[in-house]
Image: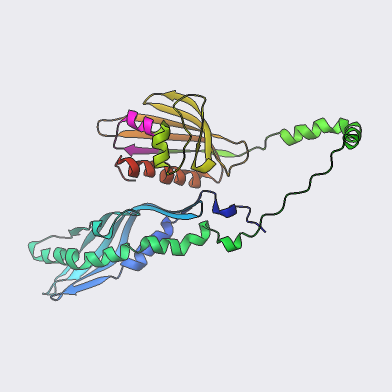
Amino acid sequence: MSNWKNVNNWHWVNKNCVKWAETYFTDKIVGTEVTKDKTTVKITSLDELTGDVDLNQRKGKLITIFDVALTYGWKGTLEDGTEVSGKIFIPEVAHDTDSDDYVFDVTIDDDKPAKQVVRGLIRKELGPILAEKLARFSDDLIKQHSSDVYIDPSQLGQAAPPRAAHPNTKEHSATHINNTSSTTGAAASSASAPKKVNTTTIKDTVEFLTSANELYNTLLDPGRASIWSRGPAKISDKVGTKFEFFNGNVTGEILELEIGKKIVESWRLKSWPEGHYSTVTLTLEQSSDCVKLHMQQTGVPVGEEELTRNNWNGYYWRAIKETFGFGANF
């Protein structure tokens, strides 16, 4: 039997793994301890995790997209027995962060000169250990959750053969028309009636370190779109033209344009009910140092909100920032 949900792992699949990440960063980091010259420091708690952690599968390829900030509590003891405590803030643990690029901002409660030795111990001895542990996150994320978004080819099986068509002779057709003419119209009407889809609205605001005009062109220029979407992209800056991204998994039509200020489009995922489109309104607000993109999407099928929001964040906003250096992290 073929897998009807995601044949050949072709469709765009996403899993939000933030809750799992909280447990992971607690289990792997809390309890880590170093001692040097009779001074000891130990991580005692994960106080805060903010950001996004997603595992995605597209065309059989597993992709980790994550960007989180972590705040840990720590306690220690100086050589003379004085107890110290404080926080370690790690501003960015991301899928594209090298182990040498992790930053550890150390704060000390009731900071006094005598306690500064702890700051050096954390940065020189504890920091490299933490960096090594953090660098394993991406691989562990895939190992733990890959089965939820990727189907092993051996489990896909063979697609069911198509049904054989009935012979359609003129005699058979005439008999069918004569005997069913009174019901054909009703049946056709029922078959063509669109299914009702319960929908909702999602909204988001994202900052980009560029100008409104530059972002507007990045969203609508086919050359740029092919770069940030990492594949062939069909898009135009003309009202009434249709667009297509990610090998047909996202399609729609440009409904309204206001250069540098506004884009309105119909938009759907291939997996949505046939013929159902949402309406996306992108409003660009220019400020002195960035542009704010306000996104409102009406008509999103109920139950698809989180997946749709995560796909915007991962495959549109983050991809554009990383590709063109438009800065501000999520």
Q: Is residue 208 magenta?
A: yes
> With 114 as the anchor, is 147 left or right in this view?
right
Give the residue drawn at x 81%, y 30%: 185
Instruction: Residue 267: tell me if it is visible.
Output: no
40 versus 139 height, above or below = below
Q: Position of residue 252 (x, y in %)?
A: 53, 33
Against 271, residue 267 (above or below) is above
Left or right of 186, for residue 22: left
- Quarter of the figure with residue 293: top left
Q: Is residue 114 above or below residue 279?
A: below
The number of callouts visible is 0
Kindly indicate the quadrant of the structure image that contains residue 127. Answer: bottom left
Q: At which x and y percent is residue 169? A: 87, 37
Is residue 112 visible in the rendered structure shown here? yes
Q: Residue at x 60, y 52 (%)?
A: 5
Q: Residue at x 34, y 67 (%)?
A: 28
Residue that appears at 46% across and 37% down: 233
- Render colour scheme: rainbow
User: 71 or 284, which is in the foreground?
Assistant: 284
Name the image quarter holding residue 204.
top left
Quadrant (top left/top right/bottom left/bottom right) for the N terminus: bottom right
Question: Does 225 sit left or right of 70 as displayed?
Answer: right
**Where in the figure is residue 52, as x and y percent of width and height?**
39, 51
- Using the image as rendered, state which of residue 61 and residue 266 is in the foreground: 61
Magenta extent: 205-218
Query: Is residue 81 shown in magenta?
Result: no
**Most distant residue in the bottom direction:** 38
